[in-house]
Amino acid sequence: MVTQKPRIVIIGAGMAGLTVANKLYKSGVKKGAFELCVVEGGNRIGGRINTSEFGGDRIEMGATWIHGIEGSPIHKIAQEINSLESEQPWECMDGFLDDPITIAENGYVLHPSLVDPISNLFNNLMNFAQGKKKSIGDGIGIDKCGNGDSSVGSFLKKGLESYWKLESRKETEDVFGCGDWNRKSLEEAIFAMHENTQRTYTAANDLHNLDYLAESEYVMFPGEEITIAKGYSSIIESLASVLPPGVVQLNKKVDTIEWQPECVMGIMGNKHDGNSRAVKIHFLDGTSMSADHVVVTVSLGVLKAGIFNHNNDSGMFKFKPPLPNYKIEAISRLGYGVVNKLFLKLSPDLNLGIDRFPFLQMVFHESDHQVKNSKIPWWIRRTASLSPIYEKSNVLLSWFAGEEALKLESLPDEVILDEVSTTISSFFSHKESNASVKFDKVLKSQWGSDPLFMGSYSYIATGSSIADMDTVAEPLPNTSVFESTSGSPQLQILFAGEATHRTHYSTTHGAYLSGIREANRLLQHYHCIDI
């Protein structure tokens, strides 16, 4: 009988997967406790982190922000590897974002006295929903806003309606200098602008799909939100740097994970003879790999696609036998959406009568009769802003979520350049009659159509709860569910990734913390001292 070291295979070389590998290598593999392998379906490491360049500036195609620096493990790593400063310009989104210019469709510049009350209302409502404030203010009572509403969208709608009831002015009164806008339609459109920004934070196509109660359970790290000067990929490279050559294998797309929920003769506990291991991974290239433990770090979108793959098509990530029903149901209930970034390089012949492009907030008409003759396409109407990636950059950035993010992916670059140029020029028509905005180049992310991700990040959808994320995170077999299978090898399949962290989902630090959790689970299983 030949005694083998337990083999751990990690699927996915993104933040979660490389965190697991980094921790296991330093705390277990170096001590000879087990073998380690990371298989990645793409041709690069990083997952939904992908630092690139555009127009001479460093940009992020995926994860962009450190969401709160106090207590953030990502911020700590960035400090340790000196990634927070760079000589090359980067997507820093510096202080000019605090001084936006807000323009309504057809070129009407809105005075802060019109914009600020609605902006403050929206912020107060979201702060209340997220548990940051105990009251909404402005005389808007909790009972009027419906504290128990099931969705964030419903809560916000009632908040705006309550605000209007408190106002004594006429809702239909015209706003001086704003053409066909009346006060109510303008306020509604400003509010919608903020809702569209919120959708990019959450990845929800519609805020009515976002669970209200879960908002207050989400945890933010304190402190400012910053970007990483040397790029988010520097964090990934640091995590991977401890791994010896050959540990990470690229272009290894998984087809099937074959596991054993029931005890199989010859495989008991962690004792093996020959090549017997509890799990077998089949790849699309026809090869396979056996393992004692597999840590799955693929996106929630990939898991969803796998469980809905009723035809068992080859090429779709799947489990054999299928995941237990309780886990499938949790995966099904949770939300997972698409957020894309659109980068545009300004043409040198900018003709706006201003020395730099501002942080532009865009307010669009909502009603059909007002937009039916408009040349502005629908996919642009649900974005909220366009701004330089730093104050004097000629690279501009706009965010898209949901259906318009998917539409963006399908459009040719020349169509995007033409339609965005036309739209933005119309917003600056107030400057001079021949005002025009032209762009030379465009670059967009395409997370929705990428089969390795099938979207951007997760959220708690109406009908789901934080408990569903706990369920997704549970390893298999789960003896509390499979009471008759206690003889099966334990921890065959473990789950990590942002969608498995109950309080920090949708973030890179959530993915990181989930990776630490699963690495520690295995280290404790093998009685390795954590160092």
Image: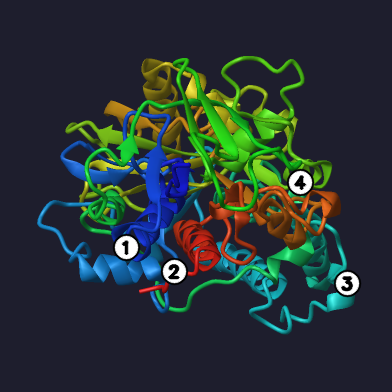
Q: CA distance from mark 1 to mark 4?
A: 34 Å
Looking at the rendered structure, the secondary structure element under dot 4 is helix
Residues at circles 2 and 1 in contact by the CB criterion of under 8 Å:
yes
Task: Give me the disc on residue 144.
Answer: 3
257 and 233: which is toward the camera: 257
Residues at circles 2 and 4 in contact by the CB criterion of under 8 Å:
no
Task: Give me the disc on residue 528.
Answer: 2
| Residue 36 visible in image | yes
The x, y position of residue 164, in whole percent, is 79, 65
Closer to the chain start, of discs 2 and 4, is 4
Residues at circles 3 and 2 in contact by the CB criterion of under 8 Å:
no
Label 3 or label 2, whichever lies nearer to me, is: 2
- Image quarter (top left, top right, bottom left or bottom right) of the C terminus: bottom left
Which residue occupies 71% across, 44% down? 206
Category of crowding for the residue at label 1, using alpha-carbon neighbours closer than 10 angstroms: few (below 14), some (14–19), many (at least 20): few
Closer to the chain start, of discs 3 and 4, is 3
> Is residue 490 positioned above or below 252 on the image?
below
Q: Which residue is mark 1?
A: 31
Category of crowding for the residue at label 2, using alpha-carbon neighbours closer than 10 angstroms: few (below 14), some (14–19), many (at least 20): some
Looking at the rendered structure, the secondary structure element under dot 2 is loop
Residues at circles 1 and 4 in contact by the CB criterion of under 8 Å:
no
> Is residue 90 positioned above or below 395 on the image?
below
Residue occupying the far bottom of the picture: 134
> Is residue 113 positioned above or below 395 on the image?
below
> Is residue 220 positioned above or below 359 on the image?
below
The x, y position of residue 40, in whole percent, is 40, 34
Q: CA distance from mark 3 to mark 4?
A: 37 Å
- Looking at the picture, which amino acid does disc 3 mark? Lys
Q: CA distance from mark 3 to mark 2?
A: 55 Å
